[in-house]
Image (tube, rainbow, N blue to C red):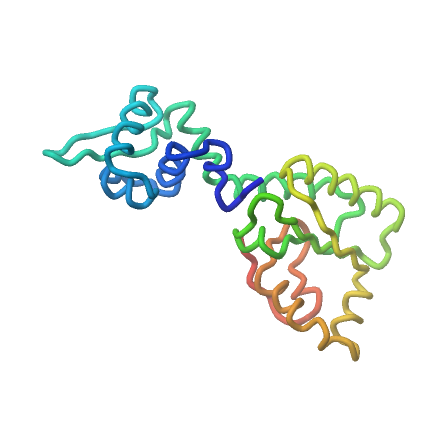
Amino acid sequence: MDFLHPVEAIVPGATGRLLAALGRVEAELPVATLAQVAGVGRTRASGILADLSDLGVVTRREIGRTVLVSLARDNAAGQLIDQLANLRRGVIDRLRQLASEIQPEPASLSVFGSFARAEAEAGSDIDLLAVRHPDADGERWATSLMEFVRRARTLTGNPIEVIDYDLGELRRKTRGRSAKVGREFWGSIRRDAVILAGAHPAELLGTGNGTARQ
């Protein structure tokens, strides 16, 4: 899935761009402003928005010579567009639900990379850092984690890449002689990680509380 342009990925062309722009804001926008933001000619935008208004997906209000429009979030189709515009947030909530079913429970499970930074496009990998407790049953953990990965792949439509560490192994890699090799990588984890289950990796490493994204 293209999480950077989710509405446009499903609704192509000018209509998708207009709906995407409306989905990103709660306020009413003048048609001229919306057309400029969406990169659609004003005349064409007016026609499309009139059709969407007839369908109930968009609300229109005239103030003098200015036409204000907004996404009709109390309309069934408008609600779907709103959910699509905020797809990444909904996917994160669902991934957290799926992560709660992993057994043994992860010491930490987080997303990093482009998806965590809200930059994932169609075909982008969704990168996961999975950290298991040292006393976790390895075979049970692997089976449960792979089932999570399978369901996450189905949920997102994107390839899933997992880095799987035992907590002790993680600490050795970040504190040993080779720690400098991955300094930039671990810095991105601390900075960008979206926590799905367990603690923030930075807490596990005793290097502070990292900045967990949403």
- Vertical relation: 118 (above or below) 146: below
Image position, residue 128 (x, y; %): 69, 52
The residue drawn where x is 48% and y is 35% is 84
Question: In this orientation, which residue lies closer to the viewer: 12 or 149?
Answer: 12
In the picture provided, is 108 more to the left or to the right than 29?
Answer: right
The residue drawn where x is 61% and y is 38% is 94
The residue drawn where x is 61% and y is 58% is 193
Image position, residue 156 (x, y; %): 62, 39
Question: In this orientation, which residue lies closer to the viewer: 188 or 7?
Answer: 7
Image position, residue 74 (x, y; %): 37, 26
The residue drawn where x is 80% and y is 42% is 144
Question: In this orientation, which residue lies closer to the viewer: 175 or 3?
Answer: 3
In the rendered image, which quarter is residue 60 located in?
top left
In the picture provided, is 35 more to the left or to the right than 214?
Answer: left
In the picture provided, is 7 more to the left or to the right than 162?
Answer: left
Image position, residue 89 (x, y; %): 52, 43
User: For the view shown, which residue lies furthest in the bottom direction?
Assistant: 177
